[in-house]
Image (tube, coloured by chain):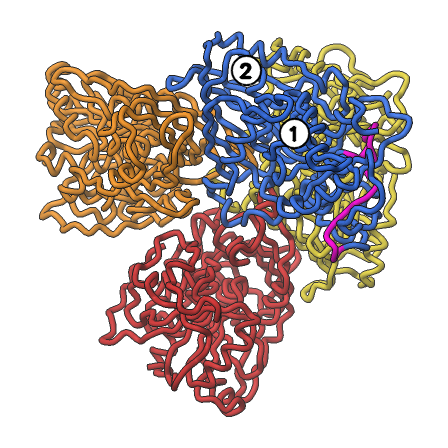
Chain colours: A red, B yellow, C orange, D blue
Amino acid sequence: MRRTYTQPPRARRLPVTLLGATGLVGQRVIALLEGHPWLQLARVVASERRAGARYGEVVRWHVETPPPTHALDLRLEPPAPSGDLRGQIVISALPADEARELEPRYAQAGALVFSNASAHRMEPDVPLIVPEINPDHLAALTTQRERRGWPGAIITNPNCSTIGLTLALAPLQRFGLERVIVTTFQAASGAGYPGVAALDLIDNVIPYIGGEEEKIETETRKILGDWEGDAFAPLAMRISATCARVPVRDGHLEAVSVAFAQRPEPEEIIAAWREFRAEPQRLGLPSAPQPAIIYREERDRPQPIADRLAGDGMAVTIGRLRPCDALDYKFLALSHNTIRGAAGAALLNAELAVATGLAE
Amino acid sequence: MRRTYTQPPRARRLPVTLLGATGLVGQRVIALLEGHPWLQLARVVASERRAGARYGEVVRWHVETPPPTHALDLRLEPPAPSGDLRGQIVISALPADEARELEPRYAQAGALVFSNASAHRMEPDVPLIVPEINPDHLAALTTQRERRGWPGAIITNPNCSTIGLTLALAPLQRFGLERVIVTTFQAASGAGYPGVAALDLIDNVIPYIGGEEEKIETETRKILGDWEGDAFAPLAMRISATCARVPVRDGHLEAVSVAFAQRPEPEEIIAAWREFRAEPQRLGLPSAPQPAIIYREERDRPQPIADRLAGDGMAVTIGRLRPCDALDYKFLALSHNTIRGAAGAALLNAELAVATGLAE
Amino acid sequence: MRRTYTQPPRARRLPVTLLGATGLVGQRVIALLEGHPWLQLARVVASERRAGARYGEVVRWHVETPPPTHALDLRLEPPAPSGDLRGQIVISALPADEARELEPRYAQAGALVFSNASAHRMEPDVPLIVPEINPDHLAALTTQRERRGWPGAIITNPNCSTIGLTLALAPLQRFGLERVIVTTFQAASGAGYPGVAALDLIDNVIPYIGGEEEKIETETRKILGDWEGDAFAPLAMRISATCARVPVRDGHLEAVSVAFAQRPEPEEIIAAWREFRAEPQRLGLPSAPQPAIIYREERDRPQPIADRLAGDGMAVTIGRLRPCDALDYKFLALSHNTIRGAAGAALLNAELAVATGLAE
Amino acid sequence: MRRTYTQPPRARRLPVTLLGATGLVGQRVIALLEGHPWLQLARVVASERRAGARYGEVVRWHVETPPPTHALDLRLEPPAPSGDLRGQIVISALPADEARELEPRYAQAGALVFSNASAHRMEPDVPLIVPEINPDHLAALTTQRERRGWPGAIITNPNCSTIGLTLALAPLQRFGLERVIVTTFQAASGAGYPGVAALDLIDNVIPYIGGEEEKIETETRKILGDWEGDAFAPLAMRISATCARVPVRDGHLEAVSVAFAQRPEPEEIIAAWREFRAEPQRLGLPSAPQPAIIYREERDRPQPIADRLAGDGMAVTIGRLRPCDALDYKFLALSHNTIRGAAGAALLNAELAVATGLAE
């Protein structure tokens, strides 16, 4: 997908350093930065042993549109922050184990690290941000910097299957979320490359994704919860996830059942989704979808093929709201796992930081 | 799949008339009757306009093993019961609308109609049988015959997605089933042929199957309920289904969450499944799987590819039992939709009738 | 796919009437006309019984990006040319049988009918145009108008699997094409919607596409042949095709072996492809890919996923040129079947007509 | 697939040692040995580091029917021949690099090594056997033993894509094979497990399989050639292959064009296939399909789903014979790549050795 941004360009586009540039998520970040009005790709970082190589020689490109030429010519840098990075934007598309070790070093050097990795998401002083939902959690950065003694910061975005769910649930918090059961139909790209074997997905479904159910259950409660000045108070809600991998390239579909403290009418729920406008939309962040939530009336939507690119891959599409005999209501939601659920999420967090003066 | 039956052959194999012989389910019935020790395919019935043609000329065979030669040579008969069919076994693989009209005519003529169609499943005097669960519901036939004034009978089996669920739930009834939420990953063959378009299932999921969710919700409560001498009392249980079609040929996977009146320990649930032995197994019905329920310990099972042929396609495979934060427990179940969920279900009902003296 | 055209807009965009607007190819035409600098969708025509309905109510949209809003609001018109259509542009995405009857009526009324249908392709006075190869065949229109006695014209484009092959072969004509053997891996969308059943393409290949092999064999020779003032002289070349359908959404891959009169060096062949520039590129037609032919060095290209959108779906990607022990050389070529192979082909023909003053 | 062998059991079933027991091909060998009347699985060998483990703990089973219980209980042995293995049957499902080093050590120790690996296939004293075609090539073993100075032997079977092609061509040798062009549609299982990534095969085709085209071109000529007492004389035939991987689990489909020295009538070709009876069929080898070649009249066959299990996965199914404008004739052939193309091929070679007294 090639994006056309509609925001006016800034006088100076801020440079972005990309960690984990060669993976699927790193590639998406590069594709999304192409033509970006505020940010530009400046440096690509990969593992020590690939440092010095041209990006174009090393990457096995998987985005469906061709890679930007200038990115192909960048030289890969080693994973070592150098100099004073104060205020610099770093986007991390690292795997969790590398992120755990490397991201703090960049934060120590002063960088604002927008991380897609799971490594630090659940730490008590690290904000886990969906800009439409909890931009106020950025306040935790003061605590983070004090405790860690670093000038930079780590700001994380949620797991690819959490983000669609939280966007669908956020407008419903007013009705009192009590119980949520979610079953996912997750795309192959969520496992990276090479990821899942073809023999595991041709004519098959794999009803297990390591760690995924726990991530949905814990991250959702943190995102929908509160920053109380010194700690996060997760939302008091019972939530249960079952995660399965299906033979789809991109787009995580989720079947959700919800019980509310005050059961609303169906029209109230749909109105809550349709009227949902939040900070990124108000601030006009370049990656913010307008609207963030699309409710479709057709009886067989959302579908990966038809809806994953809604809002340039940044919107959540919801459909089939109907009563649930066991809880209160059920519906289906879909979002693009490597755009809204990963690369675009980190980018939107970076844009939020720029728009609120955190980065500059 | 080619079955090898282990039961001793009867002196005389009872003749079977097959309605809807050319469809996917009809083909499966023919494949399963091959080598059957009690029953043999005698007559194939199709639509009026195809009557007289050789089965082999008309059928577009979709079972993965070759069609039995003798079946290919049978002449298709028109859909009109002729003569006295008292005690004759008719298996109906008709679509619902044709079944509604045609099955009563065969019952009127005396036949025992074992129907896979949805047309009569929910009628108040028609038993909806899973032989492992509610063979006692056959008692409703007395009422059916009285009310309808026919010498024959209609005995139905449930929808392809209901049957796996009810088999998984039946052993848990002792703990008091209160709420069930099920999300299905259903195979393409469930929609018949041509059924779903390739463009709707390559790289896609369709989160809607017409009428399916209602079938699961109503049929499950009828099957797990009681025949009270003059009427069925459905189980008082709250149940909610979401049904989706995935790019899989055969095998319906289901993610299930359950709340109980008396919450058991996980080991009690697994034991209930593993120790489950029921009437078809005790009677040694040829199509009865031994065991009917398989619980697997692997963390990524059941899967369509690996488990759909368990018990020659007649067993239900369950896995991943774990606590559900929103209800009590959750697990996954899988069964073969055109064998256990359709052709094999009708056949097993017929075998039950033979073993209990209903047919002869 | 959403296109961004780079050509300057005309003062007045010419109105386009679209026949067969609701099918897959018709939908692609509408998507490609969105933002088109020279042409705009004015009228949508469908079958008699749908006339009067809003396009948005009737279409089951299958293009991966959302339908243009203004198209959804158009009213479907009945298939009957009315008034004087002299010089008007009609694009026909009709099935062959309807095209056979209807397209001549529009030509009779004066319209320039750019037809994607096979109905008239092989007629002796109908040009079969690939603008990069044989724009001079438009000269046949004089003969066509004389013989038919109509003021309009029918201009056809080739079958979806022919067009990639002819573009790959055209630059090699200088070496004397003697024999060609092509085996295709064709996408599901080539069969329209619903088209192929999912059960025929999940875990399967269908080695037969009705009429396709004959189309490739006859159309290729006509396109690469000459218009001799009163008749087409097809290229004297032996050509043989095998066509198969594979589980791919879009993009026809073709394995080609060729024998030449004068066997060139591999570098000469690659240079011929890379240096290929033709009329549409010189004229700057909005849909003309720059370049039309891409030769890739990677050992595993072209692939549907990676290459079908090259040149916005209008380029042909070629790879793996190597000696063929049985003929001279072999290679693989790929093009997007519903863009370059259908909707985009008809559109490019219309643009050629506009640029050369045929339409205005 | 579960086989039912029809041959009478031998008084004593010969023990088989299986090298590479945990891979896809090794698993198939184990599945095929289940119920085998002449042979039985005695020892399973895997890599040094897994030695001592139970087979059932280590294997990630991929055959569609459950693994034999007794195999699961076998202890894996280290890859080191011990003692005198004279006359012992060893089946090797090793990858090429391990086979290169290990198979000679087993032959040195006296074993008859039936190898599916490519390592030794093209060596000048190693027979490459398809029992229906060139059982006389076993005569090369005398030379092999003399040159190598070992009491055992290495007997190889061809690559999975070669074997279907050679079986289709062998009956046509009488017409003088001059040129062959083959394009393959190969299944994912041919690459082993994990093998190809799902992201490379969902909605995609990979037109490259490392080394495969060369294997087809060289192996076919060796198999169809002669053993001249001291060396193999490959068939003087021009042959060219293009190999592609398609989203199919099992079953290699091949599109073939052929030119003959004496062009036969189509009926002669079909008769040659249908009347083809060879040594394994005459000897009644347990794995020999009856017949080895099936010619189907339907216009859309062979297909992987419908035909890969023909002859229990050991037959080759051919269809669509028709004139080829560029050579003489073209047709399609299909065989099961892990049964006929690998595990079953090695097993059939072993059975040939048993029946001819080579092993005992």
Q: Is residue B179 above or below residue C120?
A: below
Separation of residues labelled 2 and 1 (CA atoms): 20 Å
Residue type highlighted by circle 1: Pro
Foreground residue, A83 or B237? A83
Of tags 2 and 1, the one toward the viewer is 1
Of pointers 2 and 1, the one earlier in the residue sequence: 1
Q: Is residue B40 above or below residue B324?
A: above
Q: How many marks?
A: 2
Q: Is residue A73 above or below residue D58?
A: below
Disc 2 element: helix
User: Could one spot residue A321 in this view of the protein?
Assistant: no
Classify residue B211 by image quadrant.
Answer: top right
Foreground residue, A66 or D83? D83
Q: Residue shown at 66%/10% (left/top)? A: B75
Q: Residue shown at 44%/33% (left/top)? A: C185
Q: Residue shown at 62%/15% (left/top)? A: B56
Q: Position of residue C340 (x, y in %)?
A: 30, 38
Quadrant where the image shows the C terminus of chain A: bottom left
Question: What's the chain of the residue with tag 1?
Answer: D
| Residue matched to label 1 | D127
For the residues tagged 2 and 1, is the chain the same?
A: yes
Disc 1 element: loop
* Residue D206: numbered disc: none
Foreground residue, C272 or B339? C272
Question: What's the chain of the residue with tag 2?
Answer: D
| Residue matched to label 2 | D173
Residue type highlighted by circle 2: Gln
Classify residue C293 by image quadrant.
Answer: top left
In the image: residue C183, left or right of residue C315: right
Q: Position of residue B117 (x, y in %)?
A: 67, 31
Q: Which residues are magenta?
A: D33-50
